Image: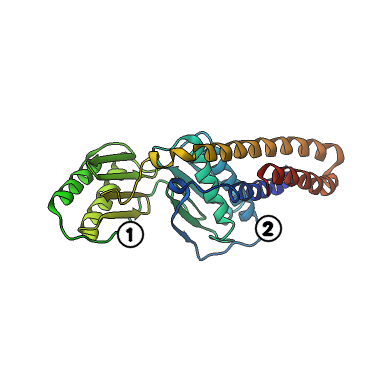
């Protein structure tokens, strides 16, 4: 059964890439913020690659019904184990969450982190990370990305409102926090594997760094490894979901394609398992390429490739 699943998991990862690339961009959801990769490469066609494909498939599948999840795919040896998680922005509807995670995963196999044992990507709407070393449930306050807008000098009324908004974010509860005062808005979020205390500690660090490093900037973004805090003044940035409501049709289309692909792969697993039992392992050699060709052809037609 394992040999049946491996090509199917690779197939699904490839299908996710196809489903993501031709559709219009949802600017407030899938805009690239930062990404990073491990320096260690895995061996092609190795058990680790198979487990990684399984992990990425699980992340995409889970994002159709949950805003956060974590997975550990075990192997026959410690070096084959892969850990991964995703976290969608707290205000996203499930179609937007699923779209964001699918697009993130597609980038891992493309321009970002090809063949690496670990990778992380932050889009506007979601965060996805995988690695061969455990990081799940570990607080990490390393600064991974900082961006401060242009400074307009210290305008006390604006900065006072900014400090008040950031203070409200630090004093609020929950993993996802938003606040605003007139033309100043802020947003903060932790990854779901942190405890309440760890989340508070991480956000306090991010907010403190944001105020000290960005000074009188019109906007500021502080991304730590497990949380972030952001603010904007005078409409410099928009962080809430209202900015992408007009793109719901595109995200729902992508969501429907993802669901269809997952259902199709599930049916292929059942069918190919039956074929394997009837014809033996040799039957898979002939039937799998044929079914893949038919499936790719139909997918290309659906996406107007």
Q: Quadrant of the N terminus?
A: top right
- Spatial CA span between label 2 and label 1: 37 Å
162 displayed left or right of 199: left
Residue furthest left in the image: 156
SS assignment at label 1: strand
275 displayed left or right of 47: right
Q: Nearer the viewer, residue 283 or 243?
A: 243
259 displayed left or right of 121: right
Residue at mark 1:
146
Asked if 156 appears above or below 264 in the picture, the reply is below
Residue 120 is situated, as x and y percent measured from the top left of the image, at 47, 55
| Residue at screen point 51% across, 45% down | 101
Residue 44 is situated, as x and y percent measured from the top left of the image, at 66, 61
| Residue at screen point 68% across, 58% down | 45
Dots 2 and 1: beta carbons under 8 Å?
no
Task: Please count the marks in the image.
Answer: 2
Residue at mark 2:
45
Q: Residues within 10 Å of mark 2 (few under 14, many from 20)?
A: few
Q: Nearer the viewer, residue 61 or 72?
A: 61
SS assignment at label 2: loop
For the residues carrying marks 2 and 1, which lies nearer the camera in this image? 1
Colour approach in the figure: rainbow
């Amino acid at each position: 059964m394992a040999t049946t699943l491996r090509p199917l998991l690779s197939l699904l990862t490839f299908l996710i890439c196809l489903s993501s690339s031709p559709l219009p961009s949802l600017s407030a959801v899938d805009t690239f913020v930062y990404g990073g990769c491990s320096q260690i490469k895995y061996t092609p066609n190795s058990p680790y690659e198979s487990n990684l494909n399984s992990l990425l498939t699980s992340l995409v599948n889970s994002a159709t019904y949950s805003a956060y999840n974590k997975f550990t795919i075990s192997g026959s040896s410690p070096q084959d184990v892969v850990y991964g998680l995703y976290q969608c922005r707290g205000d996203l509807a499930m179609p937007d969450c699923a779209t964001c995670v699918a697009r993130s995963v597609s980038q891992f196999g493309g321009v970002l982190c090809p063949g690496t044992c670990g990778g992380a990507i932050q889009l506007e709407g979601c965060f996805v990370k995988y690695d061969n070393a455990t990081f799940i449930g570990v607080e990490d306050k390393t600064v991974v990305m900082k961006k401060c807008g242009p400074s307009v000098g210290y305008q006390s009324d604006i900065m006072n409102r900014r400090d008040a908004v950031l203070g409200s974010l630090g004093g609020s509860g929950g993993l996802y926090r938003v606040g605003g005062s007139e033309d100043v808005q802020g947003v903060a979020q932790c990854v779901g594997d942190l405890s309440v205390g760890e989340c508070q500690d991480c956000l306090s660090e991010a907010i403190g760094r944001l105020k000290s490093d960005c000074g009188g900037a019109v906007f500021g973004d502080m991304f730590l490894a497990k949380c972030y805090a952001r603010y904007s003044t005078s409409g410099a940035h928009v962080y809430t979901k209202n900015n992408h409501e007009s793109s719901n049709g595109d995200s729902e289309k992508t969501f429907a394609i993802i669901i269809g692909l997952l259902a199709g792969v599930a049916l292929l697993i059942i069918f190919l398992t039956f074929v394997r039992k009837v014809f033996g392992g040799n039957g898979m050699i002939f039937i799998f390429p044929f079914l893949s060709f038919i499936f790719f052809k139909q997918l290309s037609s659906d996406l107007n490739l």
